Amino acid sequence: MKGNAVVFIDKEKVSFQEVDIPDPSSTDVVIEVEHSWISPGTESSFLRGERISGETMWTPEHPWPFPHVSGYQKVGRVINVGADVEDLQVGDKVFASVSHVKDLFFEFGGHINPAVTHHSQVWKIPEGEDPLAYSGLVLTQVGYNCGIRAPLNNKDVAVVIGDGLVGQWSAQTLLHRGADVVVLGRHADKLNLLPTEVQRINLQKEILSEVLPNYGSVSIIIDTVGSMETVSEILPFMKREGHWVSAGFLGNTGIVDIQCLREKEITLHTPSGWTKERMDQTLEGILEGWLKTLPLITHRFPSQEAAVAWSLILEKREPFLGVILDW
């Protein structure tokens, strides 16, 4: 069968084009996509040819990973259900992660319609809810995963490095758990989208080593951007038996001095990917209202204009955060 998809055809080259899709199996559902949410960090890294998989850096020994369908998250309506699928039916509004595609570098992708998807990668959206709020569910889960990794006591100080989407949802999760949250960023417009209870440090205007002591000893670091330099600046201000959560993609620069961590018995956490349990919990957080997604959407484009959306992201010609493709 045929479909349309956002295809990374080569390094920094994006095309909206027809692709071949496998016929659905008895364990698949077919989804008519309404919205898909771009993951600017991860997808940009693939578009620049930096990765061969989610956590593996591309090297010249690897094949060149193009063309492929980008992304990993969207929402829509079920239009066909396989014979062995019992928990979904035609007409359900759902979220789906990766879906099947043929004859490209990867056999799966996110921004594709119709989306033939294994039922294990589909979540039903609660009745009456706006599907758009759930269209970035995997990425929201990344922030949630960062925010739940470290044990904390009420009012522990947690520092989040990065004011992007993962940093936003990490901060929301920590705040929900009772932490005193400080977010480090470089974009006033993004920092202003944080909950009012969150403290902000704008690294474009403030010197971290001068202002961080004002917040007390740090119990948790969450690095969402892959900045070993910033982590190193914070470590001297950490409590003994603190926690460092590393979620940013570090390529080949993530060299950790274990002895440096041992001095204060700091625990290193390395969250990655998504699980059904965490996806279920993230969906519940959105439903309950403490994980907020809609206020973080700054741009929407018709899916046919995906190349325009990517020119905005790559060229950074104006501030952006959540970027949606409407199908």
Image: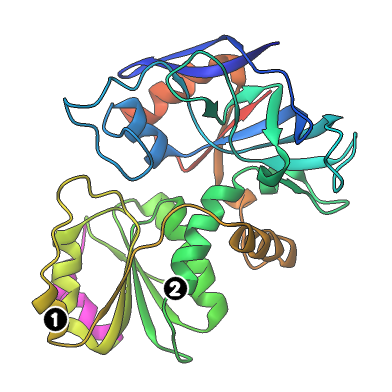
Residue 77 % position (x, y):
81, 33
Residue 196 visible? The answer is no
| Residue at image mark 2 | 149
Left or right, residue 144 beside residue 57: right
Residue 90 visible? The answer is yes
Q: Badge 2: few (under 14), some or many (20 or more) residues near its Cα, within 10 Å?
A: some
Left or right, residue 247 beside residue 2: left
Image: magenta residue range: 205-215
Q: Is residue 210 magenta?
A: yes
In this view, the residue in front, 125 or 172, is 125
Residue 258 % position (x, y):
13, 74
> Marks 1/2: CA distance?
21 Å
Residue 178 % position (x, y):
52, 84
| Total number of numbered discs in the rendering | 2
| Residue at image mark 1 | 236
SS for dot 2:
helix
Left or right, residue 266 beside residue 21: left
Q: Residue at x 88, y 52 (%)?
A: 127
Task: Single out the mark in the foreground, 1 or 2.
Answer: 2
Q: Is 158 rendered above or below residue 135?
A: below
Going by the numbered disc 2, the residue's amino acid type is Arg
Q: Quadrant of residue 140?
A: bottom right
In this view, the residue in front, 59 or 194, is 59
In this view, the residue in front, 289 or 65, is 65
The quarter of the image holding the C terminus is top right
Would you say the magenta stretch is mainly helix, strand or loop? helix
SS for dot 1:
helix
